[in-house]
Amino acid sequence: MSSETAKQPKAPPSKAYIAFLVVSHMTVSSTMLVLNKAVLHTFKAPATVLLFQVGSSALILWILGKTGTLKVDPFEFQGAKAFAWNALAFMILLFTNAKALESANVESVIVFRTMSIFVTAYGDIKVLKAKALSPGAMGALGMVLAGSVAYAASDKGFQVKNLAWVAAYGIANAAYPIVTKMVIQSKEMTSWGRTYYNNLMTFLVFLPALFILGEHKTVHQMYSEEDAITTWAVMLLGLSCLWGTAISFLGFLCLENITATTFNVMGNANKLLTLVVNATLWQHHASFLANLCLGFSLLGAGMYGHVKNQEKPDAPPPAPPKNTQSNEQGEEMQDQLLKPDDMEAGARERGGPGNV
């Protein structure tokens, strides 16, 4: 392998950059929950709203890529195949979430979602070959779980009609960040390219749901009625499409730089924060003890982030020595000195995990 083809090791991102990504993603995700509630209040067709969000995002990124405004990877079947698995995992996550909420109260679902962090951590280590969690990180995750269990017990208690669906949601929630991380590692792409592929394949995978759920009839009825689709509703839908693109882009940037376990902790912290906001703004006010438990769980999430931030990143592999000879001399020496087995190993050194 000549010095021209040798790639310099990528320097690890700074802690400030990772903190910026995490805070940005959590902020956009939290506001997206409020925005989606407003959209669905005026446009009562959730599958159609999702299709608009991912479809418009894919179309905008395709146009920006074609015009050279952004560096968006062109469409390839191999990349589409990988992101189809990611879209399928997302659809399973949404479906099991809906069934879990039908089978249990919100508090019980939150506990199972929190428990999924430990499953993700196991998959992180065994599948993605991440470093094992330190005692401090495990202790912080224990605080997250203990706080959510205490919250459920002190508020409405555990009300589970069908444990299978609640457990299925917990497993789907644990698997989703691992699947996404595997897709990221399967192919070198730009973050805009990943956002384009993810939204395009999600659109194609979810499109049949529009007809299976019968929402095409609902949309046709809304279109037929006067003032059913207002200018305000269209504006909210358009804003949610832009917000959805931002969430997807920031999500891939986060998963490029953090572990699947940390991403799962971020999601749980978002859910707990949403509960705090709902308890403050809407009619249901949790007890002081329940809110105290929520705070304890959020404190655990914050401590986990602090512990991970203090950990030293893996040192990048040493850079290959610079070849001071001419290209012709370098190639000549390689032919003489490299054994066939060494050359074969060098050709494989850039290999990563296969497609999901």
Image (cartoon, rainbow, N blue to C red):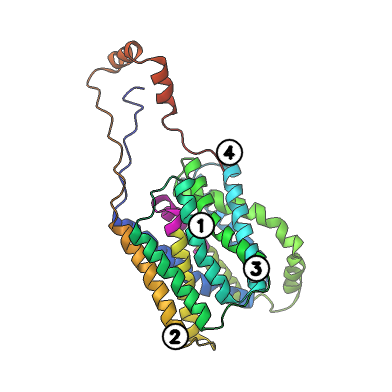
Callout 2 secondary element: helix
The boundaries of the magenta stretch are 243-262
> What secondary structure is found at the residue carrying circle 4?
helix
x then y, percent, for residue 124: 46, 50
Mark with earlier residue (1, 2): 1
Q: CA distance from mark 4 to mark 2?
A: 52 Å
What amino acid is at disc 3? Answer: Leu
Point 47% across, 77% down: residue: 150
Marks 1 & 4, CB-CB < 8 Å contact: no
**Residue 318, image x, y percentages:** 27, 35
Residue type at tag 1: Val
Q: Which residue is mark 4?
A: 78
Q: CA distance from mark 1 to mark 4?
A: 29 Å
Q: Which residue is mark 1?
A: 119
Dot 4 or dot 2: first in sequence order is 4
Residue 163 marker: 3
Q: Are marks 4 and 2 in contact (CB under 8 Å)?
A: no
Residue 121 among magenta residues: no
Q: CA distance from mark 4 to mark 3?
A: 37 Å
Front residue of 121/18: it is 121
Q: Earlier in the sequence, mark 4 or mark 3?
A: 4
Which circle's residue, 3 or 2, is located before the other in the chain? 3
Q: How far apart are labels 1 and 3 at the CA level?
A: 17 Å
Circle 4 or circle 3, nearest the eye: 3
